[in-house]
Amino acid sequence: STLPQLDDPHEEKSGLINMTKIAQGGRKLRKNWGPAWVVLTGNSLVFYRERPPQSAPSQGWVSIGQGEQQGFGGYWFAPRAPAGSRPESSVDLRGAALANGRHLSSRRNVLHIRTVPGHEFLLQSDEEPELRAWHRALRAVIERLVRR
Ligand code: I3S
């Protein structure tokens, strides 16, 4: 799915960071490092090719349909986003694992994320505090999801 899980869509952190996918559904992929605009929400990590224009939360929310099939009698809402800012991909962070990625790359400050369905990503920044901030924020979200 290209849409994040929508029951907890509030933004925890976002920013431009170097990223490569290294596995999809357990299958290894060839690295393709590049900058991505990454948004961490309450339960998903969402990747954009670039920063979506005017993505400020003040733009509000838009209904994207009813949730009855999922046993939820309400409506799903997604952040209102202008055309052309669809995410490239997103992953559910429930049960995801985080590790230092130093054994997977020659780059410095690399974080390795592996999701339950076996999608794996590396995040990298030349700025160590920036990578640490991502690590902390991701760890907090993943721990909170375990307790829910
Ligand atoms: O883990 P690898 O395969 O050594 O990763 C490097 C390669 O993907 C390389 O591209 P090709 O070998 O496909 O041409 C990339 O240019 C490197 O950046 C990859 O390694 P780093 O250490 O940068 O993650």
Image (cartoon, rainbow, N blue to C red):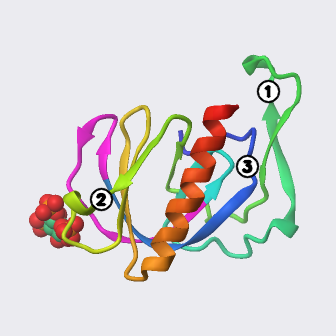
Label 3 element class: loop
Label 2 element class: loop
Q: Residue furthest bottom?
A: 127
Q: Gap between marks 2 and 1, in whole Å?
A: 38 Å
Indicate the amino acid at tag 1: Gly
The residue under the point 55% across, 45% down is 2
Ligand 1 within 8 A of label 1's CB? no
Q: Position of residue 14 (x, y in %)?
A: 61, 68
Label 1 element class: loop
Mark 3 or mark 1, which has the lower sequence index? 3
Q: Main secondary structure of the magenta part?
A: strand
Q: Are marks 3 and 2 in contact (CB under 8 Å)?
A: no
Number of numbered callouts drawn: 3
The residue under the point 87% across, 60% down is 60
Report the front residue among 2 and 44: 44
Looking at the picture, does residue 54 appear above or below residue 69? below
Q: Gap between marks 3 and 2, in whole Å?
A: 27 Å
Q: Gap between marks 3 and 1, in whole Å?
A: 15 Å
For residue 9, which numbered disc appears in the image?
A: 3
Indicate the amino acid at tag 2: Gly
Q: Mark 1 points at which residue?
A: 67
Dot 2, crowdedness within 10 Å: few (<14), some or many (≥20)?
some
For residue 101, which numbered disc appears in the image?
A: 2
Please give the range of residues in magenta: 22-39
